[in-house]
Amino acid sequence: MDVHTRIGDDGQPESAQQVFRVLFVCLGNICRSVAAEHTFNAAVLAAGLSDHVESDSCGTAAYHLGEKPDSRMLDALARAGFVYNGHRGRQFSRKDFAAFDLIVPQDDANYEDVIALASTPEEMAKVVPMSAWFPDDCPLHEVPDPYYGGMKGFDEVVELLAAATAQMASDIARAES
């Protein structure tokens, strides 16, 4: 974890606060993981956690390195009230196990790809599928890939991820109290 020392109003260092870092993972880092990152950031802000919870997203494949997210996903996020943060596509790396406290693959294939790169039980324990935060009545077990479908699929993914990441932020807030 990263440790930041804050200076209080009296000019003295306050107690160090650890930043909890979450990484969302999908295949290309232009649809699902980007949506998870954006919906999670909004949930973290709403929960009052933004000063000590951070997130990022990446893909397991190198298809879209340096590219903006899919325009259909950006449109779906905007329709739902989420603001694009300028994210550019990047690929998952072994270094991410050290840099993040929680790694959240969006589907079974990406879960397996990330787990295959883990070299310790501690690294494996950081990897939790997004479905762990799905609502109880959700019939899905992974985030569907909207890439080859229509706009409705993008909107449904944003809706699913908004609910799941709100639950995730709530769980993090509870764990910190």
Image (spheres, rainbow, N blue to C red):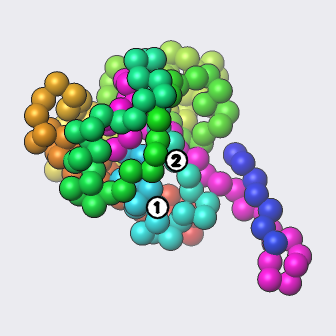
Q: What element carries label 2?
A: strand
Decide whether residue 33 is among the magenta residues: yes
Mark 2 / mark 1, whichever is N-terminal: 1
The answer to whether 97 is drawn above or below residue 8 in the figure is above
The region drawn magenta spans 8-35
Q: Which residue is rendered at x = 56% and y = 56% of the image? A: 53
Using the rendered view, name the quadrant where residue 142 is placed: top left
Asked if 164 appears above or below 100 in the picture, the reply is below
- Residue density around tag 1, few if under 14, some if 14–19, many if 20 or more, within 10 Å: many
Q: Residue at x 72, y 48 (%)?
A: 2
Q: Which amino acid does label 2 sit on?
A: Ser
Tag 1's secondary structure? Answer: helix
- Kindly tell me whether residue 139 is visible in this rendering: no
User: Relative to residue 154, is residue 150 drawn left or right?
Assistant: left
- Quick one: 162 or 150, which is closer to the camera? 150
Residue at mark 1: 44
Q: Can residue 166 be seen in this view?
A: yes
Q: How many labels does the image show?
A: 2
Residue situated in front as seen by the camera: 10 or 109:
10
**Residues packed near mark 2 inside 10 Å, few (<14), some (14 to 19) or many (20 plus):** some
**Picture coordinates of residue 96, whole percent (x, y):** 60, 31
Type of amino acid at the residue the image marks with label 1: Val
x and y percent of residue 88 in the render? Answer: 47, 35
Using the image as rendered, state which of residue 45 and residue 87 is in the foreground: 87
